[in-house]
Image: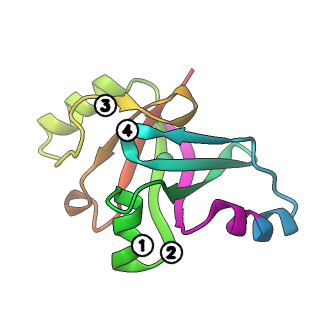
Amino acid sequence: MKITRLDHIGIAVKSIAESLKVYEAMGLKSVGVEEVAEQKVRVAFLPIGEAEIELLESTAPDGPVAKYIEKNGEGIQHIALRVDNLEAALAEMKAKGVRLIDEKPRYGAGGAKIAFVHPRSTGGVLLELSERE
Ligand code: ZN
């Protein structure tokens, strides 16, 4: 597998609109808000050079981001790494005994293919692997 770069940092927030005020005050701009129904989340991406900040706001009280905020408060929820071939990366990690949340790619915001690695395998960090054109 080949990790090509840091893709984005996912930050769980109660309100994208509220959080955007701070980032916009720093000169960053959202490239649009998208809802990912499957993950019960609304996301906004703010490009910074080659990487991005992803603001995540839950759309349902039982969604993963709502649960994260309930347990930990707002904050960094995951780190995403770009890979050149997600299916191959998942197969390789599985073969090496890494615990995965997703053994198959699923749909991510912006048309990316994504999969999560279990924090138990990564020292407590929820890692997202992402493949995009
Ligand atoms: Zn993400």
* Camera-side residue of 74 and 124: 74
Mark closer to the chain start, 3 or 1: 1
| C-beta proximity under 8 Å, tags 1 and 4 | no
The type of residue carrying mark 3 is Ala
Mark sitting earlier along the chain (4/3): 4
Q: Does residue 66 appear to the left or right of 57 in the view shown? A: left
Query: What residue is rendered at 28% in x and 67% in y?
Result: 123
Q: Look at the image and tell me whether residue 3 can be seen.
A: no
Mark 4 → mark 2, Cα distance in angstroms? 21 Å
| Residue contact at pointers 4 and 3, CB within 8 angstroms | no
Residue 70: quarter of image: bottom left
Q: Report helix, strand or loop for mark 4.
A: helix
Q: Amino acid at mark 2?
A: Glu
Q: How far across and down, in percent of the image, does residue 50 sit?
A: 70, 42
What coloring was used for the rendering?
A: rainbow
Instruction: Mark 2 vs mark 3: give the one in front.
Output: 2
The answer to whether marks 4 and 2 mark residues whose Cβ atoms lie closer than 8 Å is no
